[in-house]
Amino acid sequence: MLDNIKAVPEKIAFLIGISLILSSGFISFFIQSHASSTIVQGFIICVATLFVLSAADQRHSKECDK
């Protein structure tokens, strides 16, 4: 899974991560159970964090190569 996330270009990965973070509350709003809502929101935020960190790592790698 991490290899697939790292293969995404940095700008797209960053946009996906930020949009997932912003929409996680909206998505969990439609789940009726509070416990399930928390689990789903936590999973979404975890995946979004991976996208944002991947984009930051790609940007850092480019700057170090210069």
Image: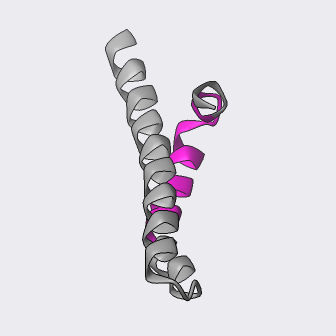
- For the point 49% across and 75% down, the residue is 37
| In-front residue for pair 48/32 | 32
- For the point 64% across and 36% down, the residue is 8
In the rendered view, tell whether residue 19 sits above or below residue 43: below
Q: Where in the figure is residue 21, as x and y percent of width and height?
A: 44, 64
7 falls in the magenta region:
yes
Q: Where in the figure is residue 49, as x and y percent of width and height?
A: 41, 48
| In-front residue for pair 19/50 | 50
Q: Is any part of residue 28 visible from this angle?
A: yes
- For the point 65% across and 28% down, the residue is 7
The image quadrant where one finds the C terminus is top left
Q: Is any part of residue 66 visible from this angle?
A: no
| In-front residue for pair 34/43 | 34
In the orientation shown, which residue stands out farthest toward the top? Answer: 65
**Residue 52 vs residue 29: left or right?**
left
**Residue 41 vs residue 7: left or right?**
left
Q: Where in the figure is residue 60, as x and y percent of width and height?
A: 35, 25
Q: Where in the figure is residue 62, as x and y percent of width and height?
A: 42, 21
The image quadrant where one finds the N terminus is top right
Q: Please state the total of marks drawn on the protein image.
A: 0
In the rendered view, tell whether residue 64 sits above or below residue 13: above
| In-front residue for pair 18/41 | 41
What main secondary structure does the magenta stretch of the protein show?
helix
**Residue 31 vs residue 62: left or right?**
right
In the rendered view, tell whether residue 11 sits above or below residue 43: above
Instruction: Give the magenta part as a residue range.
Output: 5-22
In the rendered view, tell whether residue 30 sits above or below residue 37: below
